[in-house]
């Protein structure tokens, strides 16, 4: 089935082969000529296809197909397939026989002289393995001794998230008596580890989901050396809802009307939500023609993704051999090997698979139940709460919520010069489409992740040092790689000097592309003293700018963005939350405000009370009514459009805010235009020429100019601040130099 990989590449003088692509890239006569395979990238970006053919994302490097051996002679390489899966429907659909074969498949994979454990997601497949392992341990089966005195299981959980499976995991633990180990992946850690994940995976992956498995296997390696996993169960036994749609179409094609009616009715609770979601997404679907470059798509072959739509067994075989399982096995191999862990997969036991492939389709989907023979065969083994589950999640991440939570990091990537220079996509269009999806104006498209993954893959293996040594070091920083490339792309000395002198805040790039899609700008954070109530803001900012290295010092024509938080604090407009007396109306209205990861906003009575005082009760009530009336139509942000930017700038205590202001609520600055003009005058003297200043209310969701000197291009500036490059917490960089440093060719 291709559980373990073997890659081949030809050079003018030899054949190179290895179990990892990065090893092949180190071959001296191959590293300098390795290039991205543009057809592969096209198939991946357009249709999400990967691991579906022998060719890899690296031109000239191919994967030896599953169940294949190669003979190398002076004449070349001859490949032979030694096993073919055979479909039939004449097998015995005996649940007891399935149970016997499945238990044997698990038992075979316990043979080891090192500790053995297993993954547990709370789904049907992983729980089946856990419960069978537990029984084998209780029955003192000889090979079960590898589990020790108690089975160890490893689970990823996401506290408070809709995909969290803790309640099902607890059921499995109660039934098996296994020893749990909890892993809590986070979006912050995911961003920090992206380079390393991409380096180990070697080719782009389907989603952020494999990161959860990565975290689980890293934790498991502390306790065990061999880990059983449930890969292949869904593709073998129709674990995904779309398989039930395929089966209904098969019944229609076969004119089995009675069976069709029964199956459709029995599966209505899982099929109806899928249909509604697909219809809703179709109305707001991302148009790839708007974000991809026509020149790249021209001449490319349309992706060959003709999967069977009305033959269940054939569809399962296609996914086992081509469209689904090969990619899952790659993730499994890379994630386990990255942590020196041996992974074993009971559902891909050859005898078990061959037996299932002979089953009639009604043994796999029956009366609306997917994986019917497994559910029937493991009665008394599986707890019913899991055996009779209708929905599955598995090892994955809350991807759309994670990427929305880190939208500023992705905006920084999408608007970086290196991303915008790629021949595949229009960087600005991708960034704008991503922003619209975050606001709910268009569907959430997997294209965003694919673009991120391709970009990071290029940075790891083809940009900078990676182009000459078979990939960056696994601890490289993709943002630094992007900024180094941007300095080269600019062709200017000042970009190189700025790269050496300034450091962007976490997750951000130092350089960005402007509104025209070509002009390159520096966004250099400047650290100031801690601004306290009553401080002279102008003096503090001037002191900070005078301390900058003369080679990159403030100069005429620069624009300085200043955080409104620093201005408001210096004006004494920040108050300890416990000193604000909230009226009843404030307490009531604050209950209807959604708290976000980027700031608490008006989600507490204290900040709502400040909003009522700042804008007046009538305006806040009008904004509340407008928001309530438009919410059913999917419109977002109406409240703040009615209440105004001054209300939107009110903040409560947020994580990362520097003490003592991590316990404060803050009003917007008073007379921001006047403050901007005063700062512009003082900084122009430092720069020996005119400098523009803007007072910015920025967070990870967006940015607004609250006040500015007369010479500031507000739309152009805001386009450069959508990733919130200011550091308003413990970075103490509330000021930012914006400077034109070149353009893309």
Image (cartoon, grey):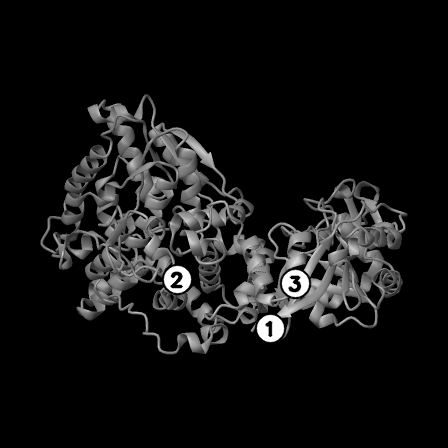
Q: Secondary structure at mark 1?
A: loop
Picture coordinates of residue 447, whole percent (x, y): 45, 64
Q: Residue at x 24, y 44 (%)?
A: 347
Say if mark 2 contacts mark 3, CB within 8 Å.
Answer: no
Write down the residue under mark 3.
Answer: 493
Dot in front, 2 or 3: 3
Dot in front, 1 or 3: 3
Q: As drawn, is 580 to the left or to the right of 199? A: right
Picture coordinates of residue 267, whole percent (x, y): 32, 58
Q: Is tag 1's residue or tag 2's residue first in the polypeptide sequence? A: 2
Q: Residues within 10 Å of mark 2 (few under 14, many from 20)?
A: some
Q: Is tag 2's residue or tag 3's residue first in the polypeptide sequence? A: 2
Q: Is residue 723 visible?
A: no
Dot in front, 1 or 2: 1
Q: Secondary structure at mark 2?
A: helix
Q: Which mark is residue 274?
A: 2
Q: Residues within 10 Å of mark 3 (few under 14, many from 20)?
A: few
Q: As drawn, is 421 to the left or to the right of 624? A: left
Picture coordinates of residue 590, whole percent (x, y): 72, 52
Write down the residue under mark 1.
Answer: 518
Q: Quadrant of residue 101?
A: top left
Q: Quadrant of the C terminus?
A: bottom right
Q: Report the front residue among 697 and 743.
A: 743
Q: Quadrant of residue 557?
A: bottom right
Marks 1 and 2, Cα distance to the nearest angstrom? 41 Å
């Amino acid at each position: 089935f291709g559980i373990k990989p073997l890659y081949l590449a030809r050079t003018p003088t030899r054949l190179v082969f290895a179990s990892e692509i990065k090893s092949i890239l180190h071959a001296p006569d191959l590293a300098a000529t390795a290039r991205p395979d543009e057809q592969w990238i096209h198939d991946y970006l357009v249709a999400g296809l990967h691991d579906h053919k022998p060719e890899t994302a690296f031109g000239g490097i191919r994967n030896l197909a599953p169940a294949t051996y190669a003979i190398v002679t002076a004449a070349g390489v001859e490949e032979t397939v030694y096993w073919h899966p055979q479909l039939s429907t004449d097998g015995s659909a005996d649940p007891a026989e399935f149970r016997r074969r499945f238990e044997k498949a698990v038992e075979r994979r316990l043979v080891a002289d090192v500790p053995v454990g297993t993954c547990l997601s709370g789904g049907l497949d992983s729980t089946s393995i856990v419960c069978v392992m537990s029984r084998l341990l209780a029955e003192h089966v000889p090979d079960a001794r590898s589990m020790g005195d108690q089975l160890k299981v490893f689970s990823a959980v996401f506290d408070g998230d809709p995909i969290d499976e803790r309640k099902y995991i607890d059921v499995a633990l109660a039934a098996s008596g296994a020893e749990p180990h909890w892993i809590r992946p986070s979006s912050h850690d995911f961003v920090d580890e992206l380079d390393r994940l991409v380096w180990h995976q070697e080719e782009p992956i389907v989603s952020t989901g494999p990161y959860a498995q990565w975290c689980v296997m890293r934790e498991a390696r502390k306790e065990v050396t061999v880990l059983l996993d449930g890969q292949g169960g869904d593709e073998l036994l129709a674990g995904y809802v779309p398989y039930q749609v395929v089966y209904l179409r098969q019944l229609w094609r076969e004119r089995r009307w009675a069976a069709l009616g029964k199956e459709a009715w029995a599966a209505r609770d899982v099929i109806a939500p899928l249909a509604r979601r697909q219809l809703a997404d179709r109305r707001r679907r991302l148009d790839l023609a708007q974000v991809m470059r026509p020149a790249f798509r021209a001449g490319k072959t349309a992706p060959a993704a003709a999967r069977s739509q009305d033959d269940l067994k054939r569809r399962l075989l296609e996914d086992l051999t081509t469209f689904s399982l090969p990619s899952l096995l790659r993730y499994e191999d890379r994630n386990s090997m990255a942590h020196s862990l041996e992974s074993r997969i009971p559902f891909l036991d050859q005898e078990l698979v061959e037996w299932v492939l002979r089953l009639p389709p009604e043994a796999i989907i029956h009366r609306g139940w997917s994986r019917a023979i497994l559910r029937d065969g493991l009665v008394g083994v599986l707890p019913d709460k899991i055996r009779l589950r209708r929905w599955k999640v598995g090892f994955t991440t809350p991807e759309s919520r994670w990427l929305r939570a880190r939208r500023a990091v992705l905006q920084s990537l999408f608007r970086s010069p290196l991303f915008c220079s790629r021949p595949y996509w229009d960087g600005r269009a991708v960034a704008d489409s991503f922003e619209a999806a975050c606001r709910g104006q268009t569907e959430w498209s997997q294209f965003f992740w694919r673009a991120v993954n391709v970009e990071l893959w290029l940075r790891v293996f083809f940009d900078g040092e990676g182009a000459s040594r078979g990939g960056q070091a696994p601890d490289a920083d993709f943002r630094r790689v992007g900024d180094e490339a941007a300095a080269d792309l600019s062709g200017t000395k000042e970009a190189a000097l700025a790269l050496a002198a300034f450091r962007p805040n976490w997750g951000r790039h130092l350089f960005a592309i402007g509104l025209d899609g070509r002009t390159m700008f520096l966004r250099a954070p400047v650290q100031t003293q801690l601004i306290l109530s009553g401080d002279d803001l102008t003096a503090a900012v001037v002191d900070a700018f005078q301390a900058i290295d003369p080679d990159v010092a403030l100069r005429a024509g620069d624009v300085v963005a200043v955080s409104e938080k620093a201005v408001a604090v210096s004006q004494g407009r920040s108050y300890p939350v416990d000193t604000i007396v909230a009226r009843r109306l404030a307490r009531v209205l604050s209950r209807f405000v959604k708290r976000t990861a980027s700031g608490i906003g008006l989600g507490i009575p204290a900040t709502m009370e400040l909003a009522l005082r700042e804008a007046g009760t009538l305006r806040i009530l009008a904004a509340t009514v407008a928001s309530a009336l438009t919410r059913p139509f999917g419109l977002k942000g109406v409240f703040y459009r009615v209440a105004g930017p001054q209300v939107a700038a009110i903040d409560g205590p947020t994580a990362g805010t520097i003490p003592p202001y991590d316990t404060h609520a803050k009003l917007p600055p008073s007379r921001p235009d006047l403050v901007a003009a005063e700062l512009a005058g003082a900084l122009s003297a430092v720069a020996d020429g005119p400098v523009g200043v803007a007072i910015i209310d920025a967070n990870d969701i967006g940015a607004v100019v609250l006040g500015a000197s007369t010479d500031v291009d507000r739309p152009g500036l805001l386009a450069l601040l959508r990733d919130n490059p200011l550091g308003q917490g413990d970075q103490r960089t509330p000021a930012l130099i914006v400077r034109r440093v070149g353009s893309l060719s």
